[in-house]
Image (spheres, helix red, strand yellow):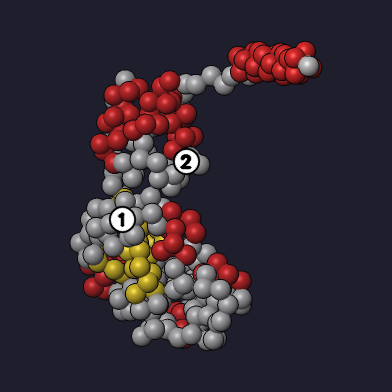
Amino acid sequence: MFETILTPVIIVAAIGLIAGLILSIASKVFAVEVDETAAKVREVLPGANCGACGCAGCDEYAAKLAKGEAEPNLCTVGGAAVAAKIGSILGVEVGAMEAKKAVVKCRGHLETTDYIMNYTGPKSCAVAKMYYGGRTSCNFACLGYGDCVAACPYNAIHIVNNIAYVDESMCVGCGACSKVCPQSILEVIPAAQKTWVACSSKENALGTRKVCTNGCLGCKKCERTCEFGAITVTDNRAHIDPSKCTNCGKCAEACPTHCIHMA
């Protein structure tokens, strides 16, 4: 009777020992070598995984930094403080950290443009755009359903008067909002830049005027007014080069539709 009970116990114990030995050997053979430098860098990164650095997330950015394949000042969320810590870990000099912010390149709210359909589908800009380009009369306007709001990890974006609004005091310029906007009306620019064109229309003057009183007409008055060559008009729309712009505001004064925004 005793042997009948003891034999299965011994067999199970032997199997357990063998399995443990196999797992121990496997853990040695298939072990993934951890890069200690990458691990240290990862600890100081904020963990937002926003992709503003150009990587898929903080883990990839840390790995590239450890291999010397990325610059230490690309984390807009962590800013200069995190860049300094990364530089200390890697033993490298960190360049100047340029603060950034997101801006909305549209002012097509309900006082300046109209809705041309009664859209009743899912409250998503991406989905709404698939239905004849969205509900607005302007095919380039903000759709107002807040995909950018949901994507922002810092509560920096809100829908005001059916159009996206960025709170600069909360925005870190991570770019998460611009990546989800199906209209591409959100752009990340230097935080010091106070002037931008709040319109994304590529229609000619007549076409834009029909659908929005705030739209860029491509008239080039701003281009002619700018003394620094910071503004050019292409595809019927004005573009401002932040590297040349002095934020003097003369272009905004010259714009007949006031689509050039001055913060």
Image spot of residue 141 (x, y percent): 46, 73
Image spot of residue 28 (x, y percent): 60, 14
As drawn, the label of residue 171 is 1
The answer to whether marks 1 and 2 mark residues whose Cβ atoms lie closer than 8 Å is no
| Amino acid under disc 1 | Cys
Q: Is residue 251 above or below residue 161?
A: above
Q: Is residue 190 above or below residue 150?
A: above
Q: Residue at x 35, y 63 (%)?
A: 157
Image spot of residue 3 (x, y percent): 77, 13
Which quadrant of the structure image shows residue 32?
Answer: top right
Determine which residue is flagged by label 2. 57
Which quadrant of the structure image shows residue 160?
Answer: bottom left
Q: Residue at x 47, y 21 (%)?
A: 35
As drawn, the label of residue 232 is none
Q: Residue at x 38, y 54 (%)?
A: 153
Query: In front: 5, or 197?
Result: 5
Query: In front: 173, or 232?
Result: 173
Q: Note whether residue 152 is visible.
A: yes
Q: Residue at x 24, y 53 (%)?
A: 192
Badge 2 element: loop
Q: Is residue 208 above or below residue 56?
A: below
